Image (cartoon, rainbow, N blue to C red):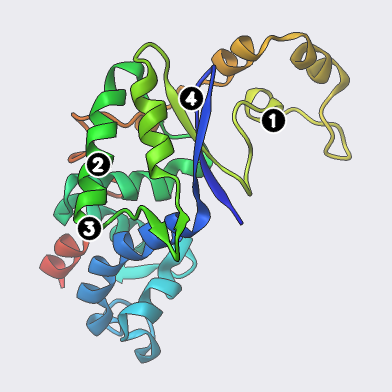
């Protein structure tokens, strides 16, 4: 089973992949329910007039939607709808779902804030303690977050690049796709702490904070509410 990992330089916690899929359903369903009745106007066939099918159609940008003559990424619209209309736990699930594969992260100073947010999500049942008596892992993430406040926490997804990883640090490869010998040698010479530091994301949009959770959208920034206003 897949996992979403929460890495620090000295520790790691995880939630089961089933919880990411549950998060995806929560995050994407509001926008899909609002837009699916307008599938044909948005450039999709009538087949996608059901919310679940609309989600499948636009997931990860497979089918763009057309708004005022412009083709835009429909999956980003669904994510942005969760940011615009969701609770803070739902907004975090949108960030986790969209950015765990590309190493979204939380600074040490925000770890206690995120722990409290997860507790709120568990209380509201948008995050789950367990399924069929199988713990999903949020309790371990809270323990990790509250263990200290001087280390960042970086996400990864088990079917994508781990963190830290040599390919994240330096993607240079030979003609066969293998790391260059000099890259591999330099990586092997690093300590774990050096690897973590070298791989820390530099793209500002990947940092999740109390200040940007409610305001930072994805891609074009349009939500289903914006799309409906333009129809």
Cα separation, mark 2 vs mark 1, equals 34 Å
Q: CA distance from mark 2 to mark 4?
A: 26 Å
Determine the CA span between mark 3 and mark 4: 25 Å
182, 175: nearer the viewer: 182
The crowding category of the residue bearing disc 2, from other C-alpha atoms within 10 Å (few below 14, some 14 to 19, many at least 20), is some
> Residue at position x 50%, y 34% from top?
13
Residue at 31% of width from left, 79% of height from top? 51
Residue under label 4, please give it: 201
Secondary structure at badge 1 equals helix
78 on left or right of 225? right
Decide if residue 69 is on the left or right side of residue 55.
Answer: left
Q: Where is residue 113 shown, x and y percent of the image?
A: 23, 28
Disc 3/disc 1 C-alpha distance (Å): 33 Å
Numbered tag placed on residue 119 in the rendering = 2
Residue 32 locus on image (x, y percent): 28, 72
Q: Earlier in the sequence, mark 2 or mark 4?
A: 2
- Which secondary structure, mark 2? helix
**Is disc 3 placed on a helix, strand or loop?**
helix
The correct choice, above or below, for 83 with respect to 51 in the image is: above
Outermost residue to the front: 133
Whichever of labels 3 and 1 marks the residue nearer the N terminus, that label is 3
Q: Based on the displayed image, in which of its 4 quarters is residue 183 positioned?
A: top right
Give whichever of discs 3 and 4 has the lower sequence position: 3
In terms of sequence position, does the residue under pointer 2 or pointer 1 come before the other? 2
Residue 96: % across, % down:
39, 44
**Which element carries disc 4, helix, strand or loop?**
loop
Q: Mark yes or no: residue 15 visible.
A: yes
In 3D space, how far apart are the residues under numbered discs 1 and 4 (Cα atoms)? Answer: 13 Å
Q: Residue under circle 1?
A: 167
**Residue 81: assigned label:** 3
- Residue placed farthest to the bottom in the image? 46
Along the line of sight, the residue nearer the viewer: 128 or 59: 128
């Amino acid at each position: 089973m897949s996992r979403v990992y929460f890495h620090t330089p000295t520790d790691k916690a995880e939630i089961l992949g089933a919880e990411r899929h549950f998060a995806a359903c929560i995050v994407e369903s509001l926008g899909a329910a609002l837009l699916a009745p307008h599938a044909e106007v948005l450039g999709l066939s009538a087949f996608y007039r059901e919310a679940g099918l609309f989600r499948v159609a636009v997931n990860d940008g497979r089918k763009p939607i057309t708004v005022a003559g412009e083709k835009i990424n429909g999956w980003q619209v669904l994510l942005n709808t969760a940011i615009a209309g969701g609770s803070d736990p739902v907004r975090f699930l949108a960030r986790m779902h969209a950015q765990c594969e590309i190493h979204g992260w939380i600074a040490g100073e925000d770890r206690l804030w995120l722990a409290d947010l997860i507790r709120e999500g568990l209380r509201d049942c948008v995050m789950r303690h367990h399924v069929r008596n199988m713990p999903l892992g949020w309790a371990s993430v809270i323990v990790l977050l509250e263990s200290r406040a001087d280390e960042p926490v970086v996400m990864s997804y088990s079917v994508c690049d781990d963190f830290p990883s040599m390919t994240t640090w330096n993607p240079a490869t030979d003609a066969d796709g293998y790391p260059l010998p000099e890259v591999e040698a330099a990586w092997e010479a690093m300590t774990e702490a050096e690897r973590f530091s070298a791989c820390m994301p530099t793209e500002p949009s990947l940092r999740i904070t109390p200040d940007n959770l409610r305001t930072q959208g994805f891609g074009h920034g349009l939500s289903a509410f914006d799309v409906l206003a333009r129809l």
